[in-house]
Structure formats: C-alpha cells, structure tokens
Image: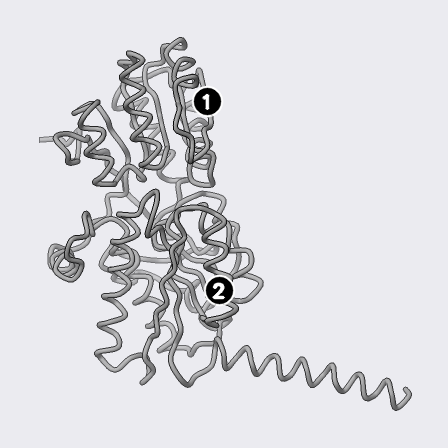
C-alpha cells in the first residue's frame, strides 16, 4: 500500500471514528440535557388532539425535571407542528434531527405525519414513540419505532364486527381520506366485514383537503347500503356530515377515532344529532390523572384522548434511559423487552414491531355537542 493510500485510509477511519463519537455525544451521550422532540397537529386537522398531546408531554417533562431529571440530566423538549400532513411533519423531523440533534421524537399524531418522517428517523437511529398514529403499515417501520396507541389492525376489525354483529348491517359503503390512517383503516374494515359475510358496495377515497363530497355521496346514496363507514379526519368530516344530510342520505353513519374532536362534535350535532357513531380506543386514564392533566392543560378540550398516551411515551422513554443509558440501540432493545408497564393509559407491552400488544374499543354516539359511549349494556 502506498503512503498516499495509507493516509487516505487513515483519514477515512478517523472520520468514521469521529462521526461515531459525535453521534454518541449528540444523541446517545450520557452528559448534558436529553433532547426530545415532539411532532403533532397543533394547527389544522386534529389540532385539539394535538394540543392535548402536547400538554401530556409537557406535564411528563415537568414532573421528571422537577424530580431531578434522568440520572441528573434534564429533558429538553422541542415542540413542532406537523399539521396532520406529511410535508410539514417531514420538515419538522428534519429540523429536530439535524438542527436540534434530538435523540428521540414523541410523535407524530396523525399517521401521515409519522409515515412521512419515520424512515429518515430509522436511518438516523432516532427513537420514535408515537402517541396517536394507528395506521397498520407503521408496524413495518423499523427497530427504533414504537407507539403507545394501538394499531388500526385492531380498530378496523372491531368496527367491522360491530357493524355486522351488533348493528346487524349486511351491506356497507366506505368514504375515506386517502392517508396512511384512512386507507389502512378502510382496508382492515373491508376485509373483516367481507369475511363475516357482508358486502362493500362502494369504496371511495377523498383527499384530506377536499371540500366537496357530493359526487362520492351520490354514489353512496345510489348504492343504498345499510351503513356508511367514513374514516375521515375531523375537518373533512364536518363537511361530509352536512352534505350527507343535504343529499337526503338516512342510513347509519360511522367513523373512526379521528372523530374524537370537540369541534367536530359541534358540527355533527347540527346535522346528525344522535345519529353519528364512531369507534375509539376504550383506554381511559385514571380519574386522578385526568384531573391533574385537565388542571395543567387549562382550556384544552378532551385531554383524555392521546394526552395520556403522550405522557406515557415520555415516561417510558425516560425510565428506559435511566436504566440502560441513552445509546439508541440499547434503548430500542430495552423498549422491545418492555412488559406490563403501568402507564396512565393502561398496561403497556411492546411486541417485535413496537406495537402495543392489547387494545379494547368502544363505540360512541355524538349528541348535543358531546360524545358518550353507545350500546352499553344496562
């Protein structure tokens, strides 16, 4: 080997070694603050859910830091608005990873946010713990991905079984938002509904920003199904329910967990008061924790949805770093081994895909500007 080649090889080795040291100190080091990013819908679709999640994370960070931090290190939280859209979430994650040098991201909220930035996070060995993203395909994300909210592989099955078995519906139409969440939930619902013996007569996708559903709803009306399943985000759903009634469609309408939004409750009450149902996780925080989060998150509606899951995500991350250090591989391995963590949102265990292993669902009805559990046995 010539001297010139030796020098070049030496430089390459030095760059690799220094790069590793930089990575370990910047993201997985054991001194200084622990930088953790947050991505969620703070404006736009699902903004009320994003506000609850942000407050859940803020409360966890506050409590941890006031108790002395993690092995003496404070958590430095950096909050970014993913707007429930792919492009803003991707930009937010790029800033968090490459400018702020966070070691972990709590988020996103909407599945489209998480799907947009998760591949880059996996390549960067950034731990991602989503508190509300539920698209089934996220299970394939990678070693450093986890979520404290259940996959729609469970919710879609539940919704189909509820429609077929409890409501006795045999034909369905589906109107969904073309997004990882809407498309994923639709696929699972359709498969299970047909397995049970039902028929899906119409399945039409709409963009999240669309404001006119009348052409699609006209197809639905012509098909005359027993039920319409509409996994749409809340802003679009507000338009959908008005046009649904305007076109004279009277069959049962059922949505998914993105309808857990106070602003949507108001709109749905105007048009379908007592006639709009949706499925949502049955996970409930303790009354003590819900009261504490409500007191902290003054003015934020419905803190019990995804706020506790964000709180748990931060607490689990902090406890893991306390036990194994901040190296991302060690953190990921420890999280995959987590079993029966006693979180405020329930018991949490992660499987090989980073998904929680158990979830239960309920159906709620929207009436008089509120939602309450429906079909409860007395």
Percent coordinates x, y for residue 218 in the rendering: 40, 13
Secondary element under disc 1, as helix, strand or loop, is strand
Colour scheme: one colour
Q: Are marks 1 and 2 in contact (CB under 8 Å)?
A: no
Secondary element under disc 2, as helix, strand or loop, is helix
Which is more foreground, mark 1 or mark 2?
Answer: 2
Determine which residue is flagged by label 2.
Answer: 95
Q: Quadrant of residue 182?
A: top left
Percent coordinates x, y for residue 336 in the rendering: 44, 62
At a point 52% along the width and 68% down the height, the residue shown is: 98
Percent coordinates x, y for residue 377 in the rendering: 13, 31
Between residues 36 and 329, which one lies in front from this camera angle? 36
- Return the disc, 1 or 2, that comes first in the chain's sequence: 2
**As drawn, 304 above or below 34:** above
Percent coordinates x, y for residue 111 in the rendering: 43, 46
Q: Quadrant of residue 155?
A: top left
In the displayed structure image, the side of residue 189 where residue 141 appears, left or right: right
Mark linked to residue 123: none
Quadrant where the image shows the N terminus: bottom right
At a point 72% along the width and 83% down the height, the residue shown is: 13
Q: Mark 2 packing: few (<14 Cα in 10 Å), some, or many (20+)?
A: some
In this figure, what is the number of numbered marks? Answer: 2
Determine which residue is flagged by label 1.
Answer: 203
Farthest residue to the right: give it. Answer: 2
**As drawn, 247 above or below 92:** above
In the displayed structure image, the side of residue 65 where residue 9 appears, left or right: right
Between residues 184 and 107, which one lies in front from this camera angle? 107
Q: Mark 1 packing: few (<14 Cα in 10 Å), some, or many (20+)?
A: some
At a point 47% along the width and 60% down the height, the residue shown is: 93
Quadrant where the image shows the C terminus: top left
Between residues 351 and 118, which one lies in front from this camera angle? 118
**Between marks 1 and 2, how big is the CA–CA gap?**
38 Å
């Amino acid at each position: 080997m010539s001297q010139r080649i030796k020098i070049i090889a030496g430089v390459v080795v030095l760059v690799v070694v220094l790069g590793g040291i930089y990575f370990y100190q910047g993201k997985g080091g054991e001194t200084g603050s622990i930088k953790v990013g947050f991505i969620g819908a703070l404006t736009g679709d699902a903004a009320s859910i994003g506000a609850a999640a942000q407050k859940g994370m803020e409360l966890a960070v506050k409590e941890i830091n006031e108790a002395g931090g993690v092995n003496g290190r404070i958590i430095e939280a950096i909050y970014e608005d993913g707007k429930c859209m792919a492009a803003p979430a991707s930009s937010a994650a790029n800033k968090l990873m490459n400018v702020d040098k966070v070691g972990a991201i709590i988020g996103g909220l909407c599945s489209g946010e998480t799907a947009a930035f998760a591949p880059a996070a996996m390549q960067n060995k950034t731990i991602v713990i989503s508190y509300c993203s539920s698209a089934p395909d996220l299970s394939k994300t990678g070693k450093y991905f986890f979520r404290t909210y259940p996959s729609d592989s469970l919710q879609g099955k539940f919704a189909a079984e509820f429609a077929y078995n409890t409501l006795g519906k045999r034909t369905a139409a589906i109107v969904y938002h073309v997004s990882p969440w809407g498309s994923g939930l639709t696929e699972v619902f359709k498969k299970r509904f047909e397995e049970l013996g039902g028929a899906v007569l119409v399945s039409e996708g709409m963009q999240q920003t669309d404001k006119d559903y009348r052409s699609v709803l006209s197809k639905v009306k012509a098909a005359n199904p027993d039920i319409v399943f509409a996994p749409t985000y809340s802003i679009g759903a507000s338009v959908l329910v008005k046009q649904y009634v305007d076109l004279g469609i009277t069959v049962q309408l059922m949505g998914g967990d993105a309808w857990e939004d106070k602003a949507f409750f108001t709109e749905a009450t105007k048009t379908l008061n007592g006639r709009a149902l949706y499925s949502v996780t049955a996970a409930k925080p303790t009354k003590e924790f819900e009261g504490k989060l409500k007191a902290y998150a003054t003015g934020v509606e419905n803190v019990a949805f995804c706020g506790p899951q964000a709180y748990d995500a931060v607490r689990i991350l902090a406890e893991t770093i306390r036990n194994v250090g901040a190296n991302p591989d060690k953190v990921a391995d420890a999280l995959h081994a987590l079993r029966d963590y006693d979180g405020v949102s329930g018991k949490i265990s992660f499987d090989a895909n980073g998904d929680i292993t158990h979830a239960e669902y309920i159906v709620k009805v929207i009436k008089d500007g509120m939602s309450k559990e429906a079909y409860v046995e007395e």
